[in-house]
Image: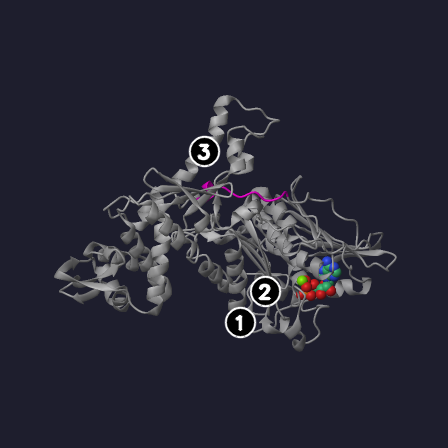
Amino acid sequence: MARIQVLDSGTINKIAAGEVIERPASIVKELVENSIDAGATAITVEVRDGGISYLRVTDNGSGIEAGEVRNAFLRHSTSKIRSAEDLELVTSLGFRGEALASIAAVSRTEVLTKTADALTGIRYVNEGGKELIFEEVAAVAGTTFKVEELFFNVPARRKFLKKPAAEAAAVTDFMQKIAMGHPEISFQYIRGNSRVLHTPGDYRLKNCVYAVYGKEVLNELMEVDYDGVLGVKGFISRPQTTRANRSYQHFYLNGRMIRSRLIEKILEECYKDLVMPGSFPMAVLQITLDPSLVDVNVHPTKMEVRFSDEGLVREEIYKAVSRTLGQEDLMTRIVQAEVVPQVEEPVKEKEDWASVFPVMGTQAKTSVEIRPQEKIHKKELWQENGYYSGRQEVLPTVLEEPAPVYEVRPKVEVQPEPEVRPQPQPQSQPDNRFPDPSSLHLVGQVFFTYWLAEADGILYIVDQHAAHERVLYDKIRSVLNRGMLDSQILLEPAVVNLSISDYASVMEHMELFTRMGFEVEPFGESTVLVRCVPYIFNGPMDAGDFQDMAALLSEGSRNISQDVLLDKMAMMACKAAVKGNNTLSEAEARALFESLAKTTNPYNCPHGRPTIVTMTKQQMEKLFKRIV
Ligand code: ADP
Ligand code: MG
């Protein structure tokens, strides 16, 4: 065997670089975080070739003193903590003191830096851990890092880099995230020859979100502003607007961007009645918390954190999100002002119609028709009606224009004034609230499905099936919360054959079935005897419904809480109960309005579809060109 030797520091740095420096985006992250820690108010990031051949980060922060520059590149050298005790209260983004050493070990790194009171700056070049240049130069206050030829001396790592476009995308992703985490800083991000991101640094998160995602997305967001044991500020999307994955969810803790399964789950929980399974709300949430209640040193890139009181954090964030959801008007509006053609751009008659009908058309499409007496699997129903992809079809409500993106402010000398002007509250017109049922003038029913009603210059259109589902669902849930649903004995027990996996899930969840009102017993291999079925308000369920529930449970019952399972079953039960009754008398329709008004969420059915949409007199007049 070879002799055991202590490795030299260059080798140690190269090995250690593997931990924090994976790709250009991780270098950008370290450098930008250093700039933030240095108190910069403007940070510019440039990449060429995805950052593989060249990246540069410029800030107007504190700068590094001439005598400290070399030290900054030493391993475990940091100005941010002095001892392990400081870790308890660390508020800076960096503290491990290894980024610069690691970056320099695997690239050609150049820094140009000057503090405010130094007369000259320092230019320092380090290649693969070796110092090449240390000289005094003229410079402005602040720091510029240039990193070239990443992994020039570690071909094995270089091979693992992706194509420049993919590396650039990772940098873009980071820049968007960090920009939304720091509205107080003006970020510019230049990729190749184009500036792809520019935030104003005016302390307004809204303007950052606007710069990152644009107006369309911003219009779909509701503002969160919660001040409890924790502070939670930011934006969450209206339930109508979701995404197919979580890449639009951004969380920050005391200015540090974090990944958090806990917060993801809280969002899931808050939106569970409002969105389809498999779709995710957008969120930008900035959480502030006493730093001693959180451990940030559990992961080398510090993306994961540990809360000392997870229960408290969960409770507080849950409150913040659910209050925002409850407060906000969730009613879908039928027409958006912008849909009406503008006078400046006259449109041909044909297009005029086109501009009206898509609105009506998409609305109609979002209502699920429940085919009488027919068993449709829930999932199919969603797909049929375009729900998985259809969220954008529901029209956004109108928000006021976000402020324009300003030019970057000059250097530190000019301190930006914190925003004191109260932000205009979105959505506060009187027509946002659910109408008082007693004041409604019932106009009638159309297409055997929709009820039209009028009050105070607003036309309300209610999808009776969706409304009915919401009402039943709430009733079922409240009965289930207290105990069991009523059940009815079948005159003759039904013999139900199940697939092996459905049978297994029935056995596993027997207690749930009992609570739902089923009485079931095993009857040979993968066959059961159903003796009793739930009796839900207007009628019994049948053995076929039982089969559907069994299938639903075995689909994804692992890792799902009992509560969520009950929920799924309640949804299914109300669907079964709503089937077939297309005719409603006026009195019944009025009763439905009244019960709907009392539900936990009168604006959406349990599957997330709207129950009620509105159109104001003014909007109708616009449609008919009585007003422009
Ligand atoms: P850490 O950020 O964990 O302290 P780094 O290796 O990233 O470690 O940086 C080492 C030190 O260099 C920092 O503690 C800081 O004092 C200094 N430094 C790095 N970048 C900057 C910058 N942009 N402006 C001012 N000081 C900086
Ligand atoms: Mg650092």
Q: 337 left or right of 78? A: left
For label 2, being within 8 Å of ligand 1 is answered no
Q: Which residue is mark 2?
A: 302
**For numbered disc 3, what is the local secondary structure?**
helix
Q: Which residue is mark 1?
A: 312
Tell me if residue 382 comes above or below residue 362 in the rendering: below
Q: Which residue is mark 3?
A: 358
Q: Which badge, 1 or 2, is on the more N-terminal residue?
A: 2
**Percent position (x, y) of residue 164?**
57, 44
Residue 395 covered by magenta stretch: yes
**For numbered disc 2, what is the local secondary structure?**
loop
Q: Which badge, 2 or 3, is on the more N-terminal residue?
A: 2
Q: Tag 1: residue type?
A: Leu
> Which range of residues does the magenta coloring cover?
391-401
- For discs 2 and 3, the disc positioned in front in the rendered view: 3
For label 1, being within 8 Å of ligand 1 is answered no
**For numbered disc 1, what is the local secondary structure?**
helix
In what quadrant of the picture does the C terminus appear? top right
Camera-nearest residue between 3 and 484: 484
